[in-house]
Structure formats: structure tokens, C-alpha cells
Amino acid sequence: MRSFFFNFRFKYRKILPFSLISLNENILNKIFFSFAALLASGIFTYSYIREWVGIKFLGEKINLQTGNPEAPYFHASENLYLTNTLIFGLLFLTIFILAVYASWKKKEGLVFLSFVLSMLCIFLTMVNGAIK
């Protein structure tokens, strides 16, 4: 099925030049990938670092599921849970910094790489949570 832009290009070819429509699609792709790379890694960075700081320095309580056999392995101890949270927080923070740098310098390849890395880290987070 052809997209709206594809049909629009050929239907109104004489009114709008081809390069103008192609330019708009490229700009939209750049904006989308920059937004997606920053948002995906930024949300996870905030959540993991905020949780670690809250537990370590603000005295928030951890709800560990030590008696549950279905709980992930890092629920076995508080130290293991904090280490796991800090590692994933720093991993997402590194990717977020890469995404900010790439967006600032307008390097589309690095923006896409940071988006892919954030998706792979989300996958790693899910696999880590599935290990019993």
C-alpha cells in the first residue's frame, strides 16, 4: 500500500516540485528519530537514576519480592537490586548523552545509532527481568 506522501507526490507533481516534498520527508524523519532517541533513552534514564537516588539518598523503601519464586533474581537482596538499577541507569544515561550530542551536532547516523541502542537496552532490561 502506498503512503500518503507517495500518492501526493505523483498527483500534484506539476504544482509542487519533487525536491520540496522529498525535503519535507527528510526533515520529518530527522525530527522523528531525534525525538524518539531522546525520549526513549531519557525516560529510562530518569526512572532508573531517580529510583536509585531515591533509595540510596532519600531513604525511600524498596518493595523487594524475596519470598516470591516468580520474582527476578535481583530481588534477592537490596544491594543486588541497587546495583542492577544503577547499571541500567548509567547505561541509559550514556545513550541519552550520545543522543543529545548527535542531535546537537546534527549527525543523523549517530542519532539513529542511539535510537537503536536504546531499543536494544530496553530489550536487555526485559531479558534481565525475565531471569529468575
Image (spheres, rainbow, N blue to C red):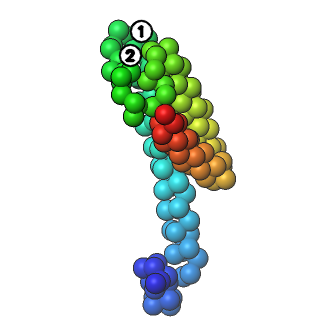
Picture quarter containing residue 39?
A: top left
Query: In the shown orientation, is residue 58 left or right of residue 104?
Result: left
Q: Which residue is mark 2?
A: 54
Task: Identify which residue, 54 or 39, lies in the foreground.
Answer: 54
Identified at 56% across, 73% down, the residue is 22
Identified at 51% across, 68% down, the residue is 24
Identified at 41% across, 9% down, the residue is 57
* Amino acid type, label 2: Gly
Residue 107, percent from left and from top: 65, 49
Q: Are marks 2 and 1 in contact (CB under 8 Å)?
A: yes
User: Callout 2 environment at 10 Å: few (<14), some (14 to 19), or many (20+)?
Assistant: some
The answer to whether residue 41 is seen in the rendering is no
* Amino acid type, label 1: Phe
Is residue 13 depicted above or below 108 in this figure?
below
User: Real-space Cα distance between discs 2 and 1?
Assistant: 6 Å
Give the SS element for disc 2. helix
Is residue 32 depicted above or below 104 in this figure?
below
Task: Identify which residue, 50 or 105, lies in the foreground.
Answer: 50
Give the SS element for disc 1. loop
User: Callout 1 environment at 10 Å: few (<14), some (14 to 19), or many (20+)?
Assistant: few
Identified at 45% across, 28% down, the residue is 48
The number of numbered badges drawn on the structure is: 2
Residue 76, percent from left and from top: 46, 20
Task: Identify which residue, 106 or 20, lies in the foreground.
Answer: 106
Q: Which residue is mark 1?
A: 57
Query: In the shown orientation, is residue 73 left or right of residue 109?
Result: left
